[in-house]
Image (tube, rainbow, N blue to C red):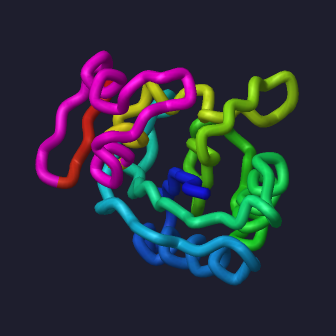
């Protein structure tokens, strides 16, 4: 099953933080990284007075016999904890941020702490642009195409920088 995860970091060696998170996930049975997007520098959303983020999307091949969305999200949160992520400020600086964007073609509607596709994925260029880089034909569970969703948001790309207000 194809599972897409958004990775972000703006503390320390950001590229290394992204690599370390993938390496930690890869140690779990049934989670295999398949393909990585480029790393993009993106301006912070919400709290502007902080360093820009290194963001990337990684597609994992996940064994559906071993993993369901809730368990996978718990594993992402465990890796964040292993890497000393501190959640003390909404949209604040972080050593690592791991968001479950898509889990195959499954749709899980909130109510608890999990919504798949991620509830803000379709609003964020730093998610959509690298997602389209990995799969330009991607279709969300609701039938919307990645190119159509990306065309509806206001952003610009300059080299490896993504700007979105």
The residue at the far left in this view is 159
- Total numbered badges shown on the rendered structure: 0
Q: Residue at x 74, y 59 (%)?
A: 64
Residue 48 visible (yes or no): no
Between 130 and 63, which is closer to the camera in this rendering?
Answer: 63
Counting from the top left corner in percent of width and height, residue 50 is at 45, 45
Q: Is residue 124 above or below residue 62?
A: above
Residue 9 visible (yes or no): yes
Q: Is residue 110 above or below residue 62?
A: above
Q: Residue at x 13, y 52 (%)?
A: 159
Between 44 and 153, which is closer to the camera in this rendering?
Answer: 153
Left or right, residue 115 beside residue 159: right
Q: Residue at x 58, y 54 (%)?
A: 3
Counting from the top left corner in percent of width and height, residue 26 is at 63, 78
Left or right, residue 24 beside residue 69: left
Counting from the top left corner in percent of width and height, residue 92 is at 58, 42
Position of the C terminus, as image quadrant, is: top left
Q: Is residue 93 above or below residue 12?
A: above
Between 138 and 36, which is closer to the camera in this rendering?
Answer: 138
Left or right, residue 66 beside residue 55: right
Position of the N terminus, as image quadrant, is: bottom right
* Residue 152 drawn in magenta: yes
* Residue 129 drawn in magenta: no
Q: Residue at x 58, y 37 (%)?
A: 91
The residue at the far top in this view is 152
Counting from the top left corner in percent of width and height, residue 126 is at 38, 41
Range of the magenta residues? 131-159
């Amino acid at each position: 099953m194809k599972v897409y995860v958004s990775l972000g970091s703006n503390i320390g060696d950001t590229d290394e933080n992204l690599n370390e998170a993938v390496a930690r996930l890869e140690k779990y049975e049934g989670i295999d990284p398949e393909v990585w997007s480029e790393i993009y520098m993106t301006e912070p959303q919400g709290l502007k007075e902080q360093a820009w983020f290194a963001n990337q999307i990684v597609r994992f091949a996940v064994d559906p016999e071993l993993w369901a969305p809730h368990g996978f999200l718990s594993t992402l949160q465990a890796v964040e904890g292993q890497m000393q992520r501190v959640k003390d400020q909404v949209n604040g600086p972080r050593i690592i941020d791991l968001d479950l964007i898509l889990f195959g073609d499954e749709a899980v509607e909130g109510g608890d702490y999990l919504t798949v596709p991620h509830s803000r994925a379709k609003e964020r260029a730093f998610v959509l642009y690298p997602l389209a880089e990995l799969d330009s034909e991607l279709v969300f569970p609701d039938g919307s195409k990645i190119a159509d969703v990306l065309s509806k948001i206001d952003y610009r790309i300059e080299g490896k920088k993504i700007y979105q207000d």
